[in-house]
Amino acid sequence: MIKYKLTCKSCKKSFDSWFSSSKEFDKLKRLKLLNCSFCNSLEITKSLMAPNVLNNLNGYSSNKTDDEKKLKFFKREIKRYQKFIKNNFKYVGENFTYEARSIHYNSKKKIKGIYGKASKEQVKELSEEGIETHMIPWVEDDKN
């Protein structure tokens, strides 16, 4: 993925957009599928965005103990989210996509939220059907 700052030649406004590659930008521009989000003009130019680089000058440390502290913090937060999910949602395991569809298409079905396992492909299919889902990292209890 690559992020470009796009500028409209007509209205002179700038906006950001992500592309899978620089070739993808060129292809979309050639097919006239890129337009200004402000004035709808097709006269769009690109410039590469500056990367966000973390270093000691910006107050970030590459110290290993700091990294370990951050990792512990994130694991703790993920565990907190997991606990909330386990207490407030029904676990449906491998049947997640089936259950999500059944809830979405059957308005009479009363059930609190669900969670379970689904592949990225299955989540994409659900999204294409208009079924909202979210993926979160999951830390197994025995790995802490």
Image: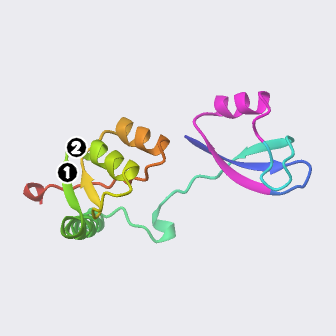
Residue at position x 81%, y 42% in the image: 45
Q: Quadrant of residue 26?
A: top right
Label 1 sits on a secondary structure element that is strand
- How far across and how far down the image is residue 97, in percent? 31, 43
Question: To which residue does mark 1 refer?
Answer: 92
The answer to whether mark 2 and mark 1 are in CB contact below 8 A is: yes
Label 2 sits on a secondary structure element that is loop
- The quarter of the rendered structure image containing the C terminus is bottom left
Question: Badge 1 local density, few (<14 within 10 Å), some, or many (20+)?
Answer: some
The type of residue carrying mark 2 is: Asn
- How far across and how far down the image is residue 118, in percent? 29, 42
Q: How is colour applied across the structure in the image? A: rainbow
- The quarter of the rendered structure image containing the N terminus is top right
Residue at position x 60%, y 33% in the image: 21
Q: Is residue 68 magenta?
A: no
Question: To which residue does mark 2 refer?
Answer: 95
Q: Is residue 94 above or below residue 26?
A: below
- Total tally of numbered discs in the picture: 2
- Work out how far the residue at label 2 is from the one at label 1, CA to CA, in angstroms: 6 Å
Which residues make up the magenta segment? 14-34
Question: As drawn, is 102 to the left or to the right of 1?
Answer: left
109 or 47: which is nearer to us? 109
Residue at position x 52%, y 56% in the image: 53
Question: As drawn, is 35 to the left or to the right of 140?
Answer: right
Q: Is residue 13 above or below residue 102?
A: below
- How far across and how far down the image is residue 38, in percent? 82, 56
Q: Is residue 17 magenta?
A: yes
